Amino acid sequence: MTHDDEIDLLVGGAVLTRMFCAELKDCRALQGNCGKRVRSAARLLFQWVEARGYSRPSLLAYALKSTDVGRECFEVLQELLNGATVCDDYEVLMSADYSREADEDWARLQEHLASYWSKHGVPALLS
């Protein structure tokens, strides 16, 4: 993979993760009445990640973390890493077996989502 390919992978992951987090943020504002939009955003993100050989966004982010691109594009990588945490939380929420588990998973997701937006209210740019 070339240096430019790695940059494209990092930026693509950050953009799609941001899209997913935006749908979750909007869903929260609509009091949860937007499940299909969130599921569609998740599906687009996970399909994109899987097409690149990774099973989840966090694995893609951690693979890029150890590259020169991860060091050169630190702010974009942080955006992807923080967004990937929200994605992982969403996967856990979708697999919850009990209502109490789902409530705890939703609370954790909301905490990480709020953290994502507090850190990345404006998208990271490449210089």
Image (cartoon, grey):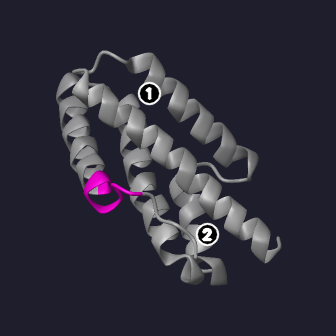
Q: Which residue is mark 2?
A: 63
**Residue 111 visible from this viewpoint:** yes
As drawn, the label of residue 81 is: none
Q: Give the distance between the C-alpha atoms of the residues marked 2 and 1, in whole angstroms.
A: 26 Å
As drawn, the label of residue 38 is: 1
In this rendering, which labeled residue sits more in front, label 2 or label 1? 1
| 86 left or right of 102 in image | right
| Residue 42 is covered by the magenta coloring | no
Question: How crowded is the residue under tag 1: few (<14 C-alpha within 10 Å), some, or many (20+)?
Answer: many
Q: Answer above or below: position of 19 versus 32.
A: below
Read off the magenta span. Answer: 116-122
User: Residue 73: which quarter of the image?
Assistant: bottom right
Residue 81: image location, x then y, percent: 45, 62
Quarter of the image with the N terminus in it? bottom right
Query: Which residue is painted at 65% across and 48% down in the image?
Result: 49
User: Residue 72: which quarter of the image?
Assistant: bottom right
Query: Which residue is painted at 31% across and 26% down in the image?
Result: 27
Q: Secondary structure at mark 1?
A: helix
Quarter of the image with the C terminus in it? bottom right
